[in-house]
Image (cartoon, rainbow, N blue to C red):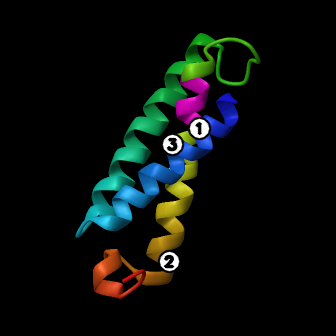
Amino acid sequence: MWIVSGIVYGLLLGGVAIEFPKGTIVGLAYTIVSGFGLLAFTIRTGNAFSKGKRLVLQSYLIGFFTGIIVIAAWIIKFGFNDRDTVGLFK
């Protein structure tokens, strides 16, 4: 369940970033800074790839990297535009 919660959190991050004008820039910066900061912390403590330790932090890591993938895919396809500017899902 912690893997599923991380993926859902990442999809939520990506969706919120896509919804707001220029939110992709802010969302990308947030996920990169927070994700790599958390990754550095968990690697330093030795809990990044351990099973059964720090599951909440690992769930957030999964979410940050899922969010980066969602936002990067949106930027590649539509640029730094929001959903209304592109005209999707009206």
- CA gap, disc 1 to disc 3? 5 Å
Which disc, if any, is residue 76?
A: 2
- The residue labelled by disc 3 is 9
**SS under mark 2:** helix
Q: Is residue 26 magenta?
A: no
**Is 13 on the left or on the right of 44, as rendered?**
left
Which disc, if any, is residue 6?
A: 1
The residue type indicated by label 1 comes to: Gly
Vertical placement of residue 89 versus 28, above or below:
below
Task: Count residues near mark 3 (Cα–Cα under 10 Å), then give few for <14, some for 14-19, many for 20+.
Answer: many
Give yes or no for contact between labels 2 and 3 (Cβ–Cβ under 8 Å): no
Residue at 48 percent of width and 72 percent of height: 74
Farthest residue, direction left: 21
* Location of residue 7 in the rendering, given as x and y in whole percent from the top left corner: 61, 45
Q: Give, as a single range, the part of the protein colored magenta.
A: 57-61
* Location of residue 67 in the rendering, given as x and y in whole percent from the top left corner: 50, 52
Q: Where does the N terminus fall, quadrant-wise?
A: top right
